[in-house]
Amino acid sequence: MGDIRRILVTGASGQIGSELTPRLRELYGKENVIASDLRKPVSDDGPFEMLDVTDAKQLDEIVVDHEIDSIVHLAALLSASGEQRPNVAWHVNIDGLYNVLEVARNRKLRRVFNPSSIAVFGPETPREKTPQETVTKPRTIYGITKVTGELLGNYYYQKWGVDVRGIRFPGVISNVSPPGGGTTDYAVEIFYEAIKNRRYTCFLKPDSILPMIYMPDCLRSIVELLEADLSRLKHHTDFNLRALSFSPIQLVAEIKRHIPDLVVEYKPDYRQAIADSWPMSLNDSAAREEWEWRPTFDLQTMVKDMLGVLSERHRSGKL
């Protein structure tokens, strides 16, 4: 596909990486996608390297040894986890990215994908239909690292021609990977608790609307941007992406259509302040125009699919 031949995926054992890696192997060939992380993946379905992305020498050796031409850089600490360990979040998210960009520049790699996040926004940002070009003054260390990452990626593109691309992902909902320490994790946890216990305590207020994306759409967006024609891209590292927007109470109402006896309590914690600084919806006209992005799942179809997959896993004793 396209001009990409050999891909290194960092953070391959994480929420997105654990599902993106198999998808990339379907598209590019099992032996052409090298997974890497600090912990081994659950399934051993292809080449894997133990990698600490803050180790520049180790990263460079893996790129050379495997003849890598593109990196999908997913290794990072997320928002809630980052607030607990801000020094570690900076070290991993910034020093790790710097190492990736440097090896891409020095080894003349074809492409780097580095995801950004809605965490780049802050209280001064318009919360409804957040523009592509707007104020980015985050209040979390995770958001600060993501703004820095966007700027670094653009710098490497403008100064050295390193083809760095990224998406400002909303909360990612998966029926495979467990929550990974994000502020939007309630939208994953609630499905597990609804099926297993019929009860959930939500750490956000019931009316906290946040943008989300279902994992199949998330994976597809990464592949589509990786393969997009560079000549069409006016933006590079900071695409807004719109798929779903809902509040906990809206999600609960949709789940209760399938599980009527679900009981939900609301006990907001420190993550509420983070959520209150993020957008409720995004304007993603740039992604739609420059690489023809279109979401597939809405709230109803996402909930039906999530419950179907997880309920079957629960019946088989695997949940």
Image (tube, rainbow, N blue to C red):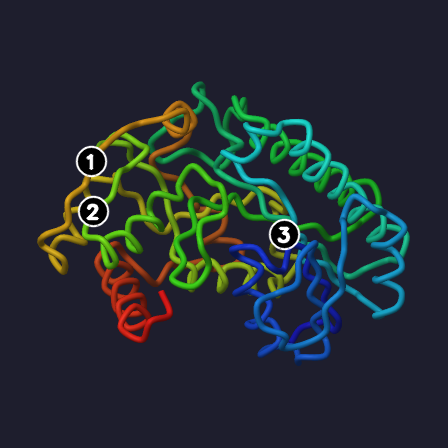
Q: Mark 2 — residue? A: 199
Residue at point 39%, 40% (across, down): 282
Question: Looking at the image, do the residues carrying marks 2 and 3 touch, with CB atoms under 8 Å apart?
Answer: no
Q: Which numbered disc, 2 or 3, marks the residue that appears first in the sequence?
A: 3
Nearer to the camera, 185 or 120: 185
Q: Mark 3 — residue? A: 74
Q: Nearer the viewer, mark 2 or mark 3?
A: 2
Please name the amino acid that badge 3 sits on. Leu
Outermost residue to the top: 124
Q: Residues within 10 Å of mark 2 (few under 14, many from 20)?
A: some
Label 1, label 3: how far apart the Cα atoms are: 33 Å
Q: Mark 1 — residue? A: 265
Q: Which numbered disc, 1 or 2, marks the residue that appears first in the sequence?
A: 2
Question: Looking at the image, do the residues carrying marks 1 and 3 touch, with CB atoms under 8 Å apart?
Answer: no
Quadrant (top left, top right, bottom left, bottom right) of the C terminus: bottom left
Q: Is residue 46 above or below residue 81?
A: below
Specify the quadrant of the image occupied by residue 95: top right
Residue 276, image x, y percentages: 37, 25
Q: Which numbered disc, 1 or 3, marks the residue that appears first in the sequence?
A: 3
Label 2, label 3: how far apart the Cα atoms are: 32 Å
Residue 253, image x, y percentages: 14, 47
Label 1, label 2: how far apart the Cα atoms are: 8 Å
Q: Residues within 10 Å of mark 1 (few under 14, many from 20)?
A: few
Give the number of the disc on residue 142: none
Question: Looking at the image, do the residues carrying marks 1 and 2 touch, with CB atoms under 8 Å apart?
Answer: yes
